Image (tube, grey):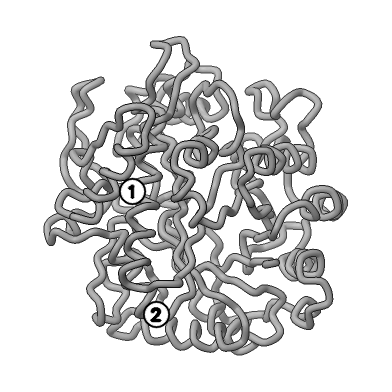
Amino acid sequence: MMQRGNGKLRGNESKVVGLQELQALAEHAATIPVNRLWVAFFDPTLVYQPGSNTFADTGMQTGSTEADLGFAEVKAAITTLQKNGVEIFLSMGGWNYNCFPALYTRYSIGGYGTHTPNYWKIQQYGGGSVDGCKEDNMWCYSCEPESEGTTLDSFSIFPEPKKSARWEAAKSYVESKATATPEWHSDVAPGEQWTDTKTGTSLKVPGNKKFNDMGRDPYEDFVLLAKDLGATGVDIDYEEFWHADYFKTGKGQTGPWELTQTVHKYVAIAKDMIDSVDKHAPGMKISTAAGAVGAWEGKWWGGNLKGIWLQAKKTFPEVMSRLEINVMTYDLSDNNEFHECPNPSTCTLDQQVEFYMKTYRDAGIPANVGYEVGQPAYPDPTHDKSHQLPLDDDVFSTILSKTQSQQPGGFFWELYKKDAGHVPATQVAQKLCKQVLGDAARCSGSIPAISPTTTTITV
């Protein structure tokens, strides 16, 4: 089965990375110890017209000075990699292309009282009140730290296209199968003003409105882009916590609640993309990143996407059967003051990874294990580094022997991230490759180094 590494040309933040790295990987395509790469991240509000052969309006920044913004260079690297047994997927989403700063701050971080893991941001930047979180402090830097220098243009959301027949068909599919009445929200339109009816505040929704102005569907355009680049597959990296917390239903102010409406939105996105693949690129594969808690049955108390993929599997099995699931079993915490562990006796990284992957096994969802190179992004290293759970040698070995052996594959984030004193990317790739692919020759290869003159910034 597959072992995967995760590469990217650009994080969806403010710093460009990766074109030289991708070209170096292509030069060593026959020996690198991975057999799949994700090129990430593309904007969910992208516009791409077939045959245009450019990264303009896609959210992808390669740092290329060419008129096509690096399209031809990336396509050449993809061709070489795939000829040498390395599949290339394009990934839509990623954290910043899911984050609506104003709503994430108010309803996810600040929606459940003051004693929550990230409420310190509201205390530090908003004077202890969510009303103090505004655009000039990027809504208390809830999506990215102040050091990233982000603006509203750094973010986006997954849209509900206003003028797409394919999106309407996906909605109709969801409505025909759903056990609760779906509610749609095309009025939360990227690049346009929208009024939060809970506060009466008018907000600009993050993202580009060009696709709506042109009457296009970004999910279909994404497939057309992948086809023109010659990619093996497309990937949906959906992490809209704000949507689940804003559109939750259930027990009033006390909980537990349901995030059924977010299940409906996610499935409609996946269905739109599946139908686009079937029309334009039959045989193209589709993967999706899934939250660690995504298959965990039980009550939902807000603040994450607990059970989204489980509910999708139960109600929309035809859609889920088309998706390869990659579980982000990293950026976990052992701070049980905030109930971060599944239970008090399951707090180490290897214990948590096994717990969460077992929920996918129990749900009958084939899923791949996620690993993170270097320092985790969560908990915030400047605020609560002591509760981070990095991938060290002993923990890595335990996960490989206990959990990885029960799953079809694995992937890691990311190829050129600094190891920060933890297991380096080449070692992660080699050991994972041997665990999954056995004695395949590429498992002894290395991730090629980049010239010291190349500035590589991980974001």
Disc 1 is placed on an element classified as: loop
Residue 332, above or below 341: below
Residue 420 on image: x %, y %: 72, 57
Q: Who's the residue at 20% across and 27% down the image?
A: 201
Tag on residue 158? 1
Residue 388, above or below 161: above
Q: Residues within 10 Å of mark 1 (few under 14, many from 20)?
A: many
Residue 401 on image: x %, y %: 86, 53
In this rendering, does residue 142 appear at all? no
Disc 1 residue type? Phe
Q: Quadrant of residue 415?
A: bottom right
Circle nearer the N terminus (2, 1): 1
Q: Quadrant of the N terminus?
A: bottom right
Disc 2 residue type? Leu
Disc 2 is placed on an element classified as: helix
Q: Quadrant of residue 204?
A: top left
In this rendering, does residue 368 appear at all? yes
Disc 2 and disc 1 in contact, CB within 8 angstroms: no
Q: Is residue 67 left or right of residue 378?
A: left
Residue at image mark 2: 229
Q: Looking at the image, which is closer to me, 286 or 99? A: 286
Residue 78 on image: x %, y %: 49, 82
Q: Who's the residue at 56% across and 84% down the image?
A: 81
Residue 103 on image: x %, y %: 34, 32
Q: Residues within 10 Å of mark 2 (few under 14, many from 20)?
A: many
Residue 367, above or below 114: below
Q: Looking at the image, which is closer to me, 22 or 16? A: 22
Q: How far apart, in angstroms, are the residues tagged by discs 2 and 1?
A: 22 Å
Q: Who's the residue at 69% across and 54% down the image?
A: 371
Q: Is residue 394 left or right of residue 420?
A: right
Residue 10, above or below 29: above
Q: Quadrant of residue 264?
A: top left
